[in-house]
Image (tube, rainbow, N blue to C red):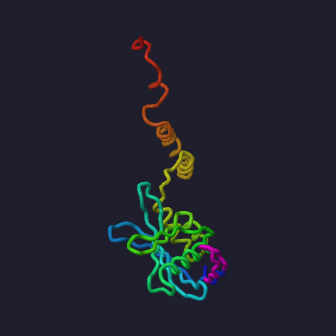
Amino acid sequence: MKGFEGRVEVGGREHVVKVIGGDAELDEGGDGRKLLRLKIKAEVDGVKSEYTITYGRRGRNNAAVGFATARADAPGGREADAERLAAVIKALTGKEPRIIERSDGTIEIICSRAHLVGLKLYAELTDTVDRRLEATSRRRPTLLYKLLFLLRRGPACVWRGYSNIFVEARGRGSSRRSRRRNPLLSS
C-alpha cells in the first residue's frame, strides 16, 4: 500500500492519489463489540490527510460495514474531504463507497465487505483483516468442510462422526422411516 499512486474519477472529477502508509488494528467498542480500525495516510490532489475507517457488524443481517466521517476542518470543507476519501478508497479497492449527508450536516462514507476484501490485498492490512473476517464470518460450515475436518483428525474419528454429519445435513426427524406412511393409520 505504501507508495501506491493512481488516478481515479469520483464525482465527475479526476483525482491523483498517493498513499503514504496504512495500518490496521483490532479494537473493542464501548458496547463490547469487536471493531477493525483501518488508518490510511494519503495525499489526494496535493492535500495530505489521515483517514480512519471503522468496520463493525451492523444491521439485521449482521453485515460487515465500515464507516468514516468527513472532517469539517479539512481544506475545502466536509464535501471535499469526503470526495478525497472516496477517491482513496476507490483507488485502493476499485469500488466507489457510498457517501451520505446526514440531517445534522455530517457526511459519512460507508464501505461494504467488498471494500474490506479489496483492502486485504495489501501487505500492511492482510493479517489483521483476515483475522477480522474469520472471527466475524457469517458462514456456517458445510458438509464438505465437516468431512474434511474429520478426515484430518484420523480414520477412527471419521467412522464415529460420519453418521452424525449426515443426520445434521438431512435435518432431525427427516429419515426415510419417519416419512413413510403407516398403513394402519391411513384411511
Residue nearer the viewer, 77 or 70: 77
What's the magenta region? Answer: 6-18
Asked whether, in this view, residue 46 is left or right of residue 171, the answer is: right
- The percent position of residue 129, horizontal first and vertical second, equals 52, 69
Q: How would you classify the magenta stretch by its main secondary structure? A: strand
- The percent position of residue 168, horizontal first and vertical second, equals 47, 40
Residue nearer the viewer, 5 or 120: 5
In the image, residue 42 above or below residue 179: below
Quarter that holds the C terminus = top left
**Quarter-wise, where is residue 9 in the image?**
bottom right
Residue nearer the viewer, 101 or 186: 101
Residue sitting at x 41%, y 73% = 27
- The percent position of residue 179, horizontal first and vertical second, equals 47, 25
Membership of 17 in magenta stretch: yes
Membership of 181 in magenta stretch: no
Residue sitting at x 47%, y 65% = 65
Residue nearer the viewer, 40 or 171: 40
**Quarter-wise, where is residue 72 in the image?**
bottom left
Total tally of numbered discs in the picture: 0
Residue sitting at x 42%, y 13% = 186
Looking at this rendering, what residue extends furthest in the left direction?
31
Quarter that holds the N terminus = bottom right
Residue sitting at x 54%, y 80% = 22
- The percent position of residue 46, horizontal first and vertical second, equals 60, 88
